[in-house]
Image: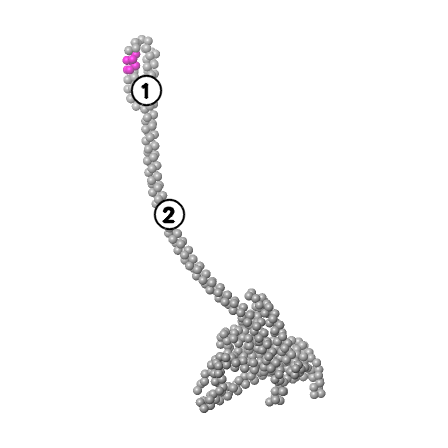
């Protein structure tokens, strides 16, 4: 049994190391794009089953996000980013439970030991993926803030220490908070999904039959919850950036 | 820091590739799913709103029509009642008039009948009288004619006629 925090490198393309998690991510993105293309062709005024399902999912998603975004207007504005994060994270998490992912691979020698390298690994058990999403969310929220508030968006970070020493330190804390947002978003998703993968690996290693089934259900649930949490936080950061910062003295 | 990043398998090239991949996915989903689906939902919402507005407008019009119908029906009922009353009055007047006319006509017919009867009676009386005189004259002629001259016959006839007329007036 081989457990590695970092994903395993499979091959290189143009100097970029293609890992098994990255490959899974590509697979998920291709799958989503293919499904989207099929969905797009089926969109009509009178919806079929597939379109009705899509409409229900989108409506429910927007309704759920209303309370976090402070209104439907904000939800619609940030929908492309937040919903994409939600569906990408959700499908990436769920695809990890598909038989073959993390179980089909090859053996290679590493430091004199024979280690198993799977062809596919859950995309979110790779920090590159979760960190990329976290960076997109945080930088995206700042871009939104800049668009709505202009240079005043940075007022909460840049305070003149001569005018308000407390405000200055609060500004430093806010800046640290932005970094901690990235760290918390990254490691929350990574930790949960990586832990789930490890748990499944151990359970399957100890008792290969029947017993892993409830854990698979748990993984599906955790995968959904984590996708939702990530999307909700992304929506809150985005919506929060549109509001003017009021300094308290 | 570098060893920390390395131990977690973070590679800047992969990170940038993930960000680009996400950007592509977001763009494709926006074009193929969110935008058309939101348009369909918006169109449907607008259609429902429009239908609701039309429905409320139709309901208002229906209410107006019902009120108008009630008004027209009430007017028609009132007019009908008035017409019926007028018709009753006219019919009563006509009946009375017809009754009077019929009565007058009947009286006239009766009078005419009586007059005709009287005339017939007089005519019949005259005929009877003539017949009686003729019979008496014939009887006298037959019984005593051969014994009397023409002057006496005439005198006798006249006397017989006079007496007959007396009897006749007595009978009357």
Q: Which residues are magenta?
A: B152-159
Q: B169 above or below A207? A: above
Name the chain under label 2: B
Comparing A149 with A205, the one in front is: A149
Q: Quadrant for the N terminus of chain B, please.
A: bottom right
| 2 and 1 marks in contact (CB < 8 Å) | no
Displayed quadrant of residue B164: top left
The nearer-to-camera label among 2 and 1 is: 2
Q: Quadrant for the C terminus of chain B, please.
A: top left
**Real-space Cα distance between discs 2 and 1?**
65 Å
Mark 2 and mark 1 lie on one chain; the one further toward the N terminus is 2
Q: Count how many numbered circles sit on residues in the image.
A: 2
Comparing A5 with A150, the one in front is: A150
Percent from the top left, x then y, of residue A100? 67, 77
Residue A215 visible: no
Percent from the top left, x then y, of residue A193? 61, 80
- The residue wearing badge 2 is B84
Displayed quadrant of residue B143: top left
- Residue A72 falls left or right of residue B74: right
Q: Is residue B157 magenta?
A: yes
Q: Residue placed at 57% from the left, 72% from the top?
A: B31
Percent from the top left, x then y, of residue A224? 58, 76
Q: B79 above or below B164? A: below
Q: Residue placed at 33% from the left, 41% from the top?
A: B96
- Residue A116 falls left or right of residue B57: right
């Amino acid at each position: 049994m081989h457990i590695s925090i970092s994903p395993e490198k499979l091959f290189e393309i143009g100097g970029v190391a293609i890992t098994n998690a990255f490959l899974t991510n590509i697979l998920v993105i291709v799958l989503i794009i293919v499904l989207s293309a099929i969905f797009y062709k089926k969109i009509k005024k009178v919806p079929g089953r597939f379109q009705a399902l899509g409409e229900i999912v989108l409506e429910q998603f927007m309704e759920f996000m209303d309370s976090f975004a402070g209104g439907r207007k904000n939800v619609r504005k940030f929908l492309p980013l937040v919903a994409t994060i939600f569906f990408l994270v959700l499908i990436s998490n769920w695809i990890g439970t598909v038989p073959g992912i993390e179980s089909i691979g090859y053996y290679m020698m590493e430091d004199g030991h024979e280690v198993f390298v799977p062809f596919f690994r859950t995309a979110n058990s790779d920090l590159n993926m979760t960190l990329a999403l976290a960076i997109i969310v945080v930088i995206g929220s700042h871009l939104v803030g800049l668009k709505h508030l202009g240079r005043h968006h940075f007022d909460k970070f840049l305070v003149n220490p001569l005018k308000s020493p407390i405000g200055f330190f609060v500004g430093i804390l806010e800046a640290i908070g932005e970094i901690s947002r990235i760290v918390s978003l990254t490691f929350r998703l990574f930790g949960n999904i990586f832990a789930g993968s490890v748990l499944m690996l151990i359970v399957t290693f100890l008792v290969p039959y029947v017993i892993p089934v409830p854990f698979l259900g748990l993984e599906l649930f955790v995968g959904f919850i984590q996708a939702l949490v990530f999307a909700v936080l992304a929506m809150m950061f985005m919506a929060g950036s549109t509001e003017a910062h009021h300094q308290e003295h | 820091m570098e060893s920390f990043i390395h131990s977690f398998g973070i590679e800047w090239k992969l990170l940038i590739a993930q960000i680009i991949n996400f950007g592509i996915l977001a763009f494709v989903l926006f074009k193929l799913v969110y935008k058309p689906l939101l348009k369909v939902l918006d169109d449907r919402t607008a259609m429902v709103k429009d239908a609701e507005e039309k429905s409320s407008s139709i309901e208002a019009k229906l209410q107006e029509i019902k009120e108008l119908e009630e008004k027209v029906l009430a007017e028609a009922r009132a007019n009908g009642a008035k017409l019926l009353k007028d018709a009753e009055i006219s019919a009563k007047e006509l009946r009375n008039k017809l009754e009077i006319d019929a009565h007058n006509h009947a009286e006239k017919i009766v009078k005419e009948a009586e007059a005709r009867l009287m005339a017939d009676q007089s005519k019949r009386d005259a005929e009877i009288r003539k017949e009686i005189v003729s019979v008496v004259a014939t009887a006298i002629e037959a019984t005593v004619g051969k014994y009397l001259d023409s002057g006496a016959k005439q005198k006798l006839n006249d006397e017989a006629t006079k007496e007959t007329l007396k009897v006749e007036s007595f009978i009357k």
